[in-house]
Image (cartoon, rainbow, N blue to C red):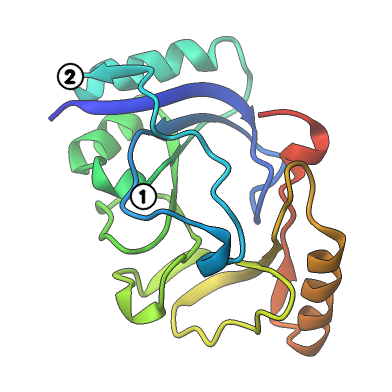
């Protein structure tokens, strides 16, 4: 199969437990959901519909990621994101990344199964939990706007995060205050802010 990609770039992860780590980001084009404020508390602010390139083989895509990684030092890491990467990624691609020495993380909405062998799964649900196919992940990140309660989740995770709804750049102050209140009442949850927006990087 061909992989349809919106963009590939190297940057610091800005969210969750791996915030601050250097990664190649592979943004897959296309998504099975459309996030709007009325339903989800926020509007999707990611351009995943444009097409940067199509790669006919996993080897072609991994080779491009190695070029983007360039002369960066340390263990190589890639984040497969979107859009929704689970619509396109497969065992062959994960195996190819591992063969090239990449640590493979995936950011997903959890509505589709993932290939085996993914090293780190970040799930940010956008739909009711009964629609989720993933039942165990490394980190679960829920976006919360004011008056949205703590998620009644059955998904097992190593880390649970609340992310305040953003308005353009950083988080909305009222949403941030609301998330801090929820965390104070539910200490198993942590705060995750989109730091890359505050850092003014991609």
Is tag 2's residue or tag 1's residue first in the polypeptide sequence? 2
Q: Is residue 179 left or right of 3 when viewed as pictured?
A: right
SS at mark 2 in the image: loop
Residue drawn at (36%, 75%) of the image: 135
Q: Is residue 199 left or right of 155 when viewed as pictured?
A: right
Q: Along the line of sight, which residue is nearer the eye, 42 or 4?
A: 42
Q: Which residue is label 2 attached to?
A: 56
Density class for disc 2 (Cα within 10 Å; few <14, some 14-19, many ≥20) is few
Q: Which mark is residue 118?
A: 1
Residue 146: x %, y % from top left:
74, 74
165 up-or-down from 72: above or below: below
Residue drawn at (76%, 82%) of the image: 182
Of tags 2 and 1, the one toward the viewer is 2
Q: Is residue 1 left or right of 99 when viewed as pictured?
A: left
Residue drawn at (20%, 43%) of the image: 91
User: In 3D space, how far apart are the residues under numbered discs 2 and 1 (Cα atoms)?
Assistant: 21 Å
Residue drawn at (66%, 38%) of the image: 21
Residue 56: x %, y % from top left:
17, 19
Residue 19: x %, y % from top left:
69, 46
Density class for disc 1 (Cα within 10 Å; few <14, some 14-19, many ≥20) is some
SS at mark 1 in the image: loop
């Amino acid at each position: 199969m061909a992989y349809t990609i919106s963009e590939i770039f190297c940057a610091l992860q800005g969210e969750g437990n791996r915030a601050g780590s250097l990664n190649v980001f592979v943004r897959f084009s296309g998504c099975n959901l459309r996030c709007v404020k009325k339903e989800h508390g926020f509007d999707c602010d990611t351009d995943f519909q444009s097409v940067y390139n199509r790669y006919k083989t996993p080897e072609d895509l991994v080779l491009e990621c190695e070029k983007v990684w360039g002369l960066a030092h340390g263990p190589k890491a890639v984040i497969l994101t979107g859009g929704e990467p689970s619509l396109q990624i497969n065992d062959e691609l994960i195996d190819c990344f591992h063969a090239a020495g990449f640590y493979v993380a995936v950011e997903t909405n959890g509505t589709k199964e993932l290939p085996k062998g993914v090293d780190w799964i970040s799930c940010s649900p956008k739909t009711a939990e009964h629609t989720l196919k993933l039942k165990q992940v490394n980190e679960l990140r829920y976006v919360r706007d004011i008056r949205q309660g703590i998620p009644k989740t059955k998904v097992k995770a190593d880390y649970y995060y609340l992310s305040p709804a953003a308005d353009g750049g950083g988080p909305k102050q009222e949403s941030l205050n609301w998330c801090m209140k929820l965390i104070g009442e539910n200490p198993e949850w942590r705060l995750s802010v989109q730091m890359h927006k505050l850092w003014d990087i991609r």
